[in-house]
Amino acid sequence: RDRPLVLGIETSCDETGVGVVRGTTLLANTIASSMDEHARYGGVVPEVAARAHLEAMIPTISAAVATAGIRLDDLDAVAVTSGPGLAGALMVGVGAAKALALALGKPLYAVNHLVGHVGADLLRDGGHLDYPTIALLVSGGHTSLLLVRDLRSDVELLGETIDDAAGEAFDKVARVLGLPYPGGPHIDRLAAEGDPTAIRFPRGLSLPKDMERHRYDFSFSGLKTAVARWVEQRQDRGEPIPVEDVAASFREAVADVLIAKAVAACTDLGVPRLLLGGGVVANARVRTLAQERCAASGIELRIPPLSLCTDNGAMIAALGAQLIMAGHESSGIDFGADSTLPV
Ligand code: KG4
Ligand code: ZN
């Protein structure tokens, strides 16, 4: 198949994403988010997310198909995220994709969410992805460093967070500072007014002894605790909290360790390319540090548009199309959702 027409379904977290692509051409990228429903809990509630996917699924498919200007019968295949992610949320997408593929008599491709994030980059610049590339994927649900030798067959997990995801740390620190959920954008905004060197917060897993065993792993729970303790001590002394400085110093610690480890992976492994993905890529400091350090090390930096960085169905469709073009067999319908699916 030359340029297969694929519909992709993504439900690994709180976004119901349905995308349509033809080969590497983006035709639709429709998202329904249950973010607002989770706000009062300060984080994504799996049960709430699963119910929201169920309600949003058919309208989101209809909207994507209308935007793409196609008929479902024209599809060459359906692709779906089968993991990793929230089990109940994944099951809704997998169930919908199976039903759609069966009803239409089309092949179904089960794909990995993290690899999908890498596939997102194919949907711009005429669908080009140079290999090998290092991918840093940072969202509320994951913080992973991948070595991608071939998107369709050879992706290696170099490291990941051993506790909180980076976005989760942003959301938790925002809570400490009394900011609404999701807190990442609020911290980013406040940080712009603060001094990033005001407070020296810890860089997780960056000490020489940690760099031996956890060179490409991340840890943000110690940082979150350090910020909470710093704020509490101030409050106990009845002193005002310099919210902007705390935000800026915290943001600096996260961005520093993310980009330091990603650039180290590029340098260690001789890979002159770094691709970013996930919602935390919206962060202004993460972007500038990546730009500065990649330029200094001769690394080509690729950042897809934000609508393709956050969770979406188009990246899943794009990966499905890649598998078809590489001649991979479909997944059948005898697979389940796997919340811990490895890359
Ligand atoms: O990829 P995404 O939209 O959804 C999932 O996590 O699945 O990422 C959302 C996460 C949230 O934790 C949010 O606080 C964070 O990304 N985020 C940011 C920024 N914008 C969103 N974190 C830091 N700075 C930002 N500007
Ligand atoms: Zn994601």
Image: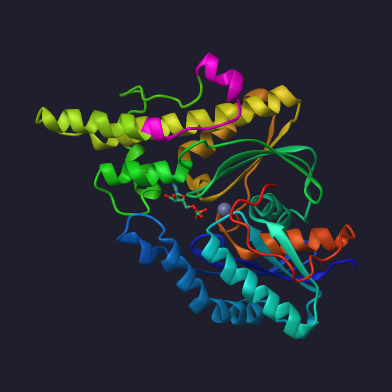
Residue for point 69% across, 75% down: 98
Residue 285 to residue 198: above or below: below
Q: Which residue lies furthest to the left in this view?
A: 238
Q: Is residue 124 left or right of residue 58?
A: right
Q: Does the magenta stretch include residue 42?
A: no
Q: In this view, does 11 lie to the left or right of 255?
A: right
Residue for point 88% across, 57% down: 326
Which quadrant: the N terminus? Answer: bottom right
Residue 331 to residue 60: above or below: above
- Locate residue 129, reporting x and y percent: 77, 47
Residue for point 74% across, 26% down: 269
Say whether residue 29 is visible: no
Chosen colour scheme: rainbow
Q: How many marks?
A: 0
- Locate residue 185, reporting x and y percent: 39, 49
Q: Does the magenta stretch include residue 208?
A: yes
Residue for point 77% across, 55% down: 127
> Which quadrant would residue 209 be assigned to in this image?
top right
Q: Residue furthest top?
A: 208
Residue 173 to residue 42: above or below: above
Q: Is residue 236 left or right of residue 295?
A: left
> Which quadrant would residue 249 be assigned to in this image?
top left
The residues colored magenta run 207-223
Say whether residue 181 is visible: yes
- Locate residue 34, reporting x and y percent: 43, 67
- Locate residue 226, reporting x and y percent: 32, 29
Residue 134 to residue 207: above or below: below
